[in-house]
Every structure is written in C-alpha cells, then in structure tokens.
Amino acid sequence: MHQKQLQYLIRRYREGTATREERELLEMHWKQMLGTDADDGLSESQRSEQGQDLFQHIIHTVQQHEPGSFHPVRSFGRNRWVVMAASLVGILLIVGAARLWLFRPGPLEYRTAYGERKHIVLPEGSVVWLNGHSTLRYAPDSLGNRQVWLDGEAQFSVRHTANHNKFVVHMANELNVEVLGTVFNVVNRHGDVNVVLRSGAVRVVDQSRQTPDIVLKPNEMISRSRVKPVLAKAAVQAKPRLGWKDGAMYLENKQLGEIFDWISDTYGITVQCTPAFRNETFAGTIPTDSIDSYFQMIEKLYQVKARKDGQTYVIE
C-alpha cells in the first residue's frame, strides 16, 4: 500500500475538496468491501454484534495509518450502534480508500514486434497508433490525469475530457509532453526525442529544468538528441510525417543514414553501406507497409545494388 497516496485521499475528504467522482469511487469500493448482501438473514442482535466488530476493526485500521487520531472506545449498547453508525460514514470511506489503493489495477502495457503496427483505444477513449518495436504503458493518476510512458514511436489522438484532465507522455531524459486534446507524433528511442504536432497544442516540459518549456503549434516539431541535448523547434509539414500509420510516409531532404536508423529501430532490418552513402539525402515517400519496396526504390534512385541477406541489406 502506498502510504502517501492514502494520506492524500484522506486529506482531500476531510478538507471537503474531494470531487464528486472521487467520492462516488470511494463509496463504490466501500460497498464492494462490505458486500451488499453480507447481513441478509441476520437477526437484529447479530447485526448489532457485527456492527460493533466492524466498528472496532475500522478504528484499528485507521489508527495504523494515522496514529493518535483515535482513542480507545468503550463498549456501547446495541441501540447506540445505530446512532454511532451515522457518525462513522467518513471513517468508512477512509477504509474504502485504503482498499481502493490496495486493489487498484496495475498499468496497462502494449507492445509491438518489429514491423508491426497496433491500433489502440485507451480506457478513457484516446486513440494510439503504436509503431513497430515499441512499448506503451498507460495509467491514470489519483487526480484523473492520464499518463503514458513511451519507448519507441507512437501517434496519439487525445480525447478532450469535460474536466480538462491532462494527458502526459513521459519520454527519455525527463521530457514530458502535456496535452488536453490533440493529434501528434512522438519518437523516443535511444535517448533521442522527436515530437511533431498536427493539430491542437502541446507543451513539452523538461523535468530537469535545463531548458524552458516549449509550446508547439500545428506543423511545428521539437527534437533533442544525445549529441545535441538542447531542445530545437522547427516548422514542418506534419501530415506527411505522420503518414506511417496509413502506409506511406513522406520525407523531404532527409539523410539516408537517419532513414536507415529508423528502419532498423522499426523493422529490425540493418543496412550496411559506406559512410558517404549514409550522408546522401532522400526526398520522397517510404512505403511503410512494404519496406522492401523502399530498397528497390533506392536501387533506381542512386544506381546501386541493395542485396538482402536475412534481416540485413547490403548496399554496394
């Protein structure tokens, strides 16, 4: 059990700042813990004894989490139990909160193999396209904000909520992308980060505070690499760059070495060629549904031979 999380819920309930959703959730879990049919068939005296036992158990449980908050209680009569029960609603909800944190579901995790693309609808309604050789973990926090951890590449279409809950993408080097509702693409591999925004607005947050927050507008991109650890913003055409999920990604004046690295990360295919050939630039469409077709295109454009050996292309 996470002590800090439990204390947080207790404090919000006592201060009267818990939201309606939080109260309803606590009540639901409390009812599940008690069991709605738990006292069916019991006599009045049995219900009273059960109530007294439950009361003492609640006091003991809460004392474990907040020592000194309660004092020993003298035994009381059966008729007084009905009166006392009304005053214990807050304590019952606290115990329900403890059970909520103890039995809450773990984060969801999605994975893709090399060359695989996966269409995901998250529990809160946002849509994710997960590119090949990528991992995505999803978990809401105690405030209802939506959080994902990405290793690889994904495209997000984030649903805006009535309560304006944030959607946070956690990446490498303490970088986060915070949004409310928008469409954007994120690459997070080997410490290199790239974010392209198609619609809406996002804020890129550096948790290390080495660089100030950057707000992106549509058709803007930020990137940071291991070699150049400074966030850089540039204007781009977002839609063609996000086309990989639809089978065709358009690139303009991209070095072949960067494209080959992307193919290696996404499809598990390595490319052997000279350093000079890696520095050549490419402008055109990459058929992401058939990456072998791209190497046939390379042969024609650059007058080379691309020989495939297992999961390796040798360019001569």
Image (tube, rainbow, N blue to C red):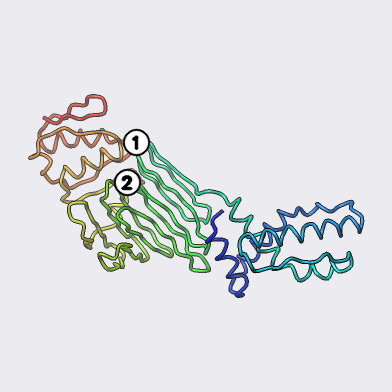
Amino acid at dot 1:
Tyr
The label shown at residue 244 is 2
Q: Which residue is mark 1?
A: 114
**In the image shown, does 44 or 202 lie closer to the viewer?**
44
Is 115 drawn above or below residue 179 in the view shown? above
Which quadrant would residue 15 be assigned to in this image?
A: bottom right
Residue visible at 55% across and 59% down in the picture: 3
State the image coordinates of residue 231 (x, y, percent, origin top left). 23, 61
The label shown at residue 75 is none
Which quadrant would residue 117 be assigned to in this image?
A: top left
Q: Residues within 10 Å of mark 2 (few under 14, many from 20)?
A: many
Image marks 1 and 2: residues in contact by CB distance under 8 Å: no
Residue visible at 45% across and 43% down in the picture: 110
**In the image shown, does 154 or 80 lie closer to the viewer?**
80
State the image coordinates of residue 286 (x, y, percent, origin top left). 25, 42
**In the image shown, does 74 or 283 lie closer to the viewer?**
74
Left or right: where does residue 121 sit relative to residue 81? left
- Looking at the figure, which quarter contains the C terminus? top left
Front: mark 1 or 2: 1
Circle 1 SS class: loop
Which quadrant would residue 94 be assigned to in this image?
A: bottom right
What's the CA distance linking mark 1 and mark 2?
Answer: 14 Å
Sequence-wise first label, 1 or 2: 1
Residue visible at 24% across and 57% down in the picture: 223
Left or right: where does residue 55 sit relative to residue 262? right
Residue visible at 26% across and 25% down in the picture: 310
Circle 2 SS class: helix
Is 44 drawn above or below residue 70 in the view shown? above
State the image coordinates of residue 261 (x, y, percent, origin top left). 22, 41
Left or right: where does residue 287 sit relative to residue 252? right
Amino acid at dot 2:
Trp
